[in-house]
Image: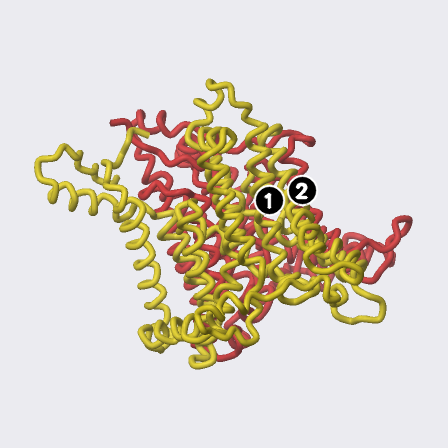
Amino acid sequence: MEYFDTLIVILQSTVRVSVPLILAALAGLYSERSGIFDIGLEGKMLAAAFAGGAAAAVTGSALIGLGAAILVSVFLALVHAFASITQRGNQIVSGVAINFIALGATVILGQAWFRQGGRTPQLGEGARFSTVELPFAAEIANVPILGPIYSNLLSGHFLLTYLAFALVPFTWWVLYRTRFGLRLRAVGENPGAVDTAGISVTWMRYRAVICCGILCGIAGAYLSMAMTAGFVKGMTAGKGFIALAALIFAKWKPVNVMFACLLFGFLDAMSIRMQGNELPLIGEVPVQFMQALPYVLTVVLLAGFIGKAIPPKAGGVPYVKER
Amino acid sequence: MSAPYAKLPAWVDYGLIPLINLVVAFLVAGLVVLAVGESPLRAAALLIEGAFGYGEGIGFTLYYATNFIFTGLAVAVAFHCGLFNIGGEGQAYVAGLGVALPILWLDQIMPWYVVFPAAIVGSAIAGAAWAFIPGWLQAKRGSHVVITTIMFNFIASSVMVYLLVDVLKPAGSMAPQTRTFAEGGQLPRLDWLLAIFGLDIGGAPFNLSFLLALVAAFVVWLVIWRTKLGYEIRTMGHSPKAARYAGIKESRIVIITMLMSGGLAGMMALNPIMGDQHRMALDFVAGAGFVGIAVALMGRSHPVGIVPAAILFGMLYQGGAEISFEMPQISRDMITIIQGLVILFAGAMENMFRPAITTFFATLGGARDAKPAPAVE
């Protein structure tokens, strides 16, 4: 029973840390499926976390915070779109630039506005998201096995958590069952064909990048307004890149994205849990090994040793209309 | 792409347009300073005063510039082959091992001029080795080098933390760093070089690796523009198809380019470890690998452009530290913003002002058959 309780605890923190990964990776999915590579997920998430934390601290409203987070993230997404779609610039370079601008600006503005060393003020009740209890969670908590699973693992999360998981099937539905999704995928594989059909490649890609901005905004808001109560300097700490790794690991498919993020989240939760503890049989595993594992796995996958990750065909290539 | 832009005079292409992009980047940075409630003009004055106003400032500026010359060259060499090596940070970090291990072995028995070559070779090999895997994966398995080098940055960071905390730290010490090197592991400073100009570098760690960086810049120019290998690299970068038809072995060129790039990034580790701190500490690279991206873009991937671009960023680092004394609102993080803006305007949006400038020169040139730039969709 003790092992079971530990497992529930680890799985619960897996869900907690996976949510921003899922949101950011889905964000990347929309963008990259339309042919716009985005390594600026990290920067957008960070800027959104800051905007959310700052706006919520000032107004005392979590919803306004969420709105500000989404706005800032969409703005940065539009900068990326302008550089890589309209200006036909290098998408990687643009993504790198956005990461740096967000990293620097969040600290400079945070220090100027709140003077707490780059933090935003601690958020009180109402200014941050609170957890929701599913119905009957308390009543069936004592039922063996099912009780803890329902009331500890499934219940007691933030609304944003349920939203993130709901977005997975929703994204699948959008991409594979709607006209918008079909065109979005087509524009990432063969923009010339889409253009011939009389659909604007530019507008299509802009919309995909805006979707990416919205989801990154939600991911950022989750970090600073749900997971913790306030923004801390550099709080994304590479989560954007883990999400990118998960996106590749999932071969750019929505449901796989969720599983990849849960896997990487699980590794993260395990590494926190295992600090100083010894594993049976293996002994103590260095924390750094667990932290590096998602990246190592992604490289191994990219190398084609476990299946093959094939990116959208037109990814990274600016579209030039025939003249 | 069907040649979208009309040809411009070389001085416009390599001088005016980069300059305009840079000015725009700094104007936007000025807006951020304004938003914080300080005067951008005073900040700029403080910046220049702090970086060039006195001997020690110049020493620090050139010390930082040394790092950026190496990492800028590393990114540039890869650019010439059409590769984007974002992994300079990780390659330099791992190359710290290539510097520190020979020094730890030799520093008590050999003078610095024996240890230095060993450390150079060590750093280049270690950096190149860390770049080899992404290069090999790109060449043989088609894994995108951008993604693998990002992943390798994180892996490098984990590996180095593990090594410094659990392996290299001397027994009984708390700080995660190697022991301090003896005399043989310390590079001489270049105080005499600035003394020629009547400047006293004071405590600035401006050292011999600056000259090595200049040599590296010259060698890169020589290799890229004056050898068969360089020609093949540039052909690959311009048109992989043409390279294939010309019988150039693609995978060989990709791997060699990544080795060169990694080696150059790796040599950056000499400057902080052997030239300044005289020990290897956690996170000694401190973002220099990423600054290299901005430097290479600004310098148009040419050593003649990279050296001044590196000095400009050295100035930002040193002068930025000075600003933060006077204006506590503007910390080092301001540099990160400027770096991002430079990458954005000089890199991703480098052609934003080109149509306007082309039209301007077309009207100047009158009837000359410069095609007008097409409207941007």
Kind of residue at disc 2: Ala
Q: Which quarter of the rendering shows the N terminus of chain A?
A: bottom right
Rendering coords of residue B291 (x, y %): 49, 56
Q: Colour of chain A?
A: red
Residue farthest along the front direction in this orientation: B196
Rendering coords of residue B242 (x, y %): 43, 22
Q: How is this picture coloured?
A: by chain
- The residue that disc 1 covers is B262
Task: Place residue A179 in its image quadrant.
Answer: top left
- The residue that disc 2 covers is B129
Task: Place residue A89 in its image quadrant.
Answer: top left
Q: Is residue B19 left or right of residue A164?
A: left
Chain designation of label 1: B
Q: Compared to A119, does B102 lie above or below?
A: above
How many residues crowd mark 2 within 10 Å: few (<14), some (14–19), many (20+)? many
SS at mark 2 in the image: helix
Rendering coords of residue A224 (x, y %): 54, 66
Q: Is residue A124 left or right of residue B174?
A: left
